[in-house]
Structure formats: structure tokens, C-alpha cells
Image (spheres, rainbow, N blue to C red):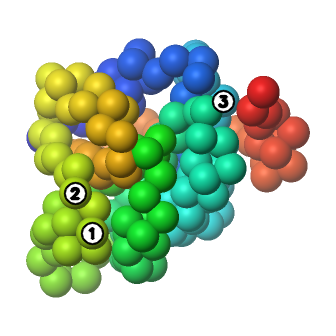
Amino acid sequence: MSARKPLLDALVSMLTPRDVLVSCLGANARYLPHMEVPSPVFALCDSMGAAIPLALGMALQRPDRHLVALEGDGSLLMSPNVLATVAAARPPNLSILLWVNGRYESSGGQALPPAPVDWAALARAAGIRHVESVRDVAGLRATFPNARSAGEPAVLVVEVAFDPAEAIPPYSERPDEIRARFRID
């Protein structure tokens, strides 16, 4: 299991200008404005569970772009049914990276409810066929290209170490700034 920042760095290094990145609230959305990301980024700051539905809508409207949704396990617990919606819509240009650390990190790192969720099995049960588990940077580098070229929705379940001492940047953009900066040509 890897720390978040090396995984995020590896992902960003594999993105192209033709990708579009949609990030849930939390650490990913807080890191991304401080990184050189080659693709358009829409980093949500206050909406749990919205990254996947937003990326799904963009994928359906822009089949010429590859959408990458970054969602946390705590956020997905808010509406896991979105996986069935993704499976039903079957966009060939959507990859979901589910960052799993067992925490509601954005609100202080509280533990998720003690119900063991097998996230890969949940995605498959919802009808998503391309599902892979990732434990480290090498695993992400191996699985992300497969997800991108799957020709169907893909879910990568990325195990992330929770570190309460991680120096996550504060939110640096307000919602109106995120909207104004986000453009897909």
C-alpha cells in the first residue's frame, strides 16, 4: 500500500492533453492545483460522491476525450448505485480510480463504518467488467494504460495508506475559480 502523493504523481505523469480529470473532494482535489497536470482538471471541493456522475456525464457528451474520475471510498459510500449507472451507460472513455483508505479523510480522517466492503466485487456486481486492484505505483503504472484502452468503463481500486500526519495542502481554489479555469476544447 502506497502513500497518496506518489500514486497521484504517477497518474498525472500518464495523463495526456486529451484526458480530462475529475477529482472528488479531499486530498486529491487539494493537491492537483499545485501540480503540473497536462489535462483539464475539475477538482470538486465540497461534494461527496459527485466525481463519478460528473465524469460520466462528460464522458457521454465528449466521446472524443478520455475521462478519469478520482473518487474516495467514503464518497462512494454516499451513492454506490452510481456504479450501476456507469455500467448501464457503458461509456468506452471512462476510467474510475477509487482511492481506498477506509477513512472520511476530508472531514478529519474518521474511520468508515466497520462494514467490510469489497470494492472490486461491488464494481463487478454493478456490471462493470474491467476492474483491477492497485496496491502501489508500479501497479498503477501497469493497470492505468489497460483501463484507458479497455473500450468500456474501467474501475481501478487503488489502496492508499492513510497518514494522519500527511501535509495535504489546504483548498487553494474556490468553486467559482474552479469553474472559470476548467475548459475542454
SS assignment at label 3? loop
Type of the residue with mark 1:
Gly
51 shown above or below 65: below
List x then y, in percent, for residue 138.
15, 23
Q: Which residue is mark 2?
A: 129
Q: Residue at x 55, y 28 (%)?
A: 19
Q: CA distance from mark 1 to mark 3?
A: 28 Å
Q: Bin the neighbour count of mark 1 within 10 Å (Cα to Cα): few under 14, some 14-19, many 20 and up.
A: some
Q: Earlier in the sequence, mark 2 or mark 3?
A: 3
Q: Which residue is mark 1?
A: 127
57 shown above or below 113: above
Q: CA distance from mark 2 to mark 3?
A: 27 Å
Res. 24 in view: no
Q: Which image quarter holds the N terminus?
A: top left
- Whether residue 10 sits left or right of residue 91 in the image: it is left
SS assignment at label 2? loop
Q: Residue at x 66, y 42 (%)?
A: 62
Q: Which residue is mark 3?
A: 40
Q: Nearer the viewer, mark 1 or mark 3?
A: 1
Q: Residue at x 17, y 61 (%)?
A: 120
Instruction: Confirm or deny contact between disc 2 and disc 1 (CB under 8 A).
Output: yes
Q: Bin the neighbour count of mark 2 within 10 Å (Cα to Cα): few under 14, some 14-19, many 20 and up.
A: some
Find residue 116 and report its image quarter. Answer: bottom left
The numbered disc on residue 45 is none
Res. 113 in view: yes
Type of the residue with mark 3:
Pro
